[in-house]
Amino acid sequence: MKTFGTPLKPSAIKIMLLGSGELGKEVAIEAMRLGVEVIACDRYDNAPAMLVANRAHVFNMRDGSALRRVVERERPHFIVPEIEAIATDTLVELEKEGWTVIPTARATRLTMDRRGIRKLAAEKLRLPTSSYRFASSLAELEEGARAVGFPCFIKPTMSSSGHGQSVARKSTDIAKSWRHAVEGSRVDTGMVIVEGAIDFDYEITQLTVRHAKGFAFCAPIGHLQIDGDYRESWQPHPMSARALRKARAVARKVVDDLCGAKGRGVFGVELFVKGDRVWFSELSPRPHDTGMVTMVSQNMSEMELHVRAILGLPIPEIVCRPGASVPVLADGEIDNPTYTGIDKALAQAGTSVRIFGKPEVKGHRRMAVTLATGRSVKDARQKALTAAKKIKVW
């Protein structure tokens, strides 16, 4: 029988979050419901998960020495990365020394960089993907774009939420896309990826759970992205039975490789679908932003599933009902975010709002999300979109 302790007592189970954004905040809440002690870490103070955690640390997580100092001081049972920009070489070292990294240090390292996960999926596992090239200079990018054809998509090998991504529709767009990718990279890797276009009907996120007893899959999540940034998601997205089987087979194959014998947790596997054909796109070894819809559409959200998998707890049937999510965005320079329209957003039955509690806005930032359930996915989407339009951040 598994034993649970009490936070701030010697018996406590400790989870350390590396990255404390909106997804980490929900992971922290789910962990604390089970009596887990949560230590939230990020590069800035008062990040969302810090607002609900037992303790917090602020440091540059790309600094391996700083990361090691905090781990050795806190001695967590589980180290749980929530962002890409982490000193993954240090995570690999810590794992070799006996610390538990979720899902594994290798998975975190490979998926931190688009080059690592794409080479794994396409070249080792031979999964269908878009055509692609890597480029470390403008000249190489121009050559790569000609090879994959136009239009093509240029992305930093390390970024998130669409930062640095653009579409080049003709050769004269390449120089601008190169500058945009270099400036938008989370870490200066000196490399970008250029991908050829796929003629797909839709794209989905297949949330895949690797847990103590094997695998579990959530209903497919449809999503709309603009410039690589999610603007809407809904669940369940309709698919043919054959396409769904293929999607889950692709997800299972890549997750199984990343996890090895012991890895566990939730993975957000992004896929393109046309008819019954499925292509692998990207993967996050943690709860996915499009999966925020599961906070209302499933009996267990992706964050609860992540915590259950981490702790080795049972994951029974995952039940889904029609739901949708729409992020609330802010632009500009705001040092004291204020929200209006919350009352109007909540006027419709079946709607809810989550304000993340981010301390400031610099540029373009996701600040909240509206969630809705409905008689159908179409109904839920309309509710969530209507609610999001009511909220202003200033």
Image (cartoon, helix red, strand yellow):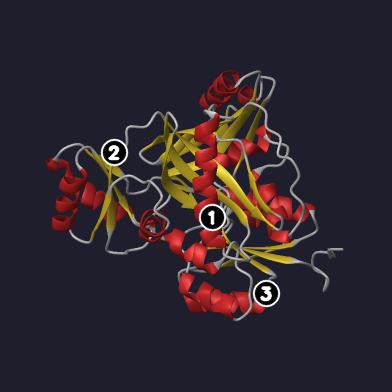
Q: CA distance from mark 1 to mark 3?
A: 29 Å
Could you tell me which residue is drawn at 46 percent across and 74 percent down?
89
State how far apart marks 1 and 2 are (Cα): 24 Å
Q: Is residue 189 above or below residue 121?
A: below
What is the CA distance from the residue labelled 2 to the residue labelled 3? 46 Å
Whichever of labels 1 and 3 marks the residue nearer the N terminus, that label is 3
**Tag 3: amino acid:** Glu
Label 1 neighbour load within 10 Å: few <14, some 14-19, many 20+: many
Query: What is the three-letter code of the residue carrying label 2?
Result: Ala
Q: Quadrant of the N terminus?
A: bottom right
Pick the front one: 53 or 376:
376
Residue holding disc 3: 74
Q: Position of residue 78 (x, y in %)?
A: 66, 67
**Horizontal and vertical percent position of residue 251:** 52, 48
Residue indicated by mark 1? 255
Of all residues, the one furthest to the bottom in this rendering is: 97
**Which residue is identified by label 2?**
197
Query: What is the secondary structure assignment of the residue under circle 2?
Result: loop
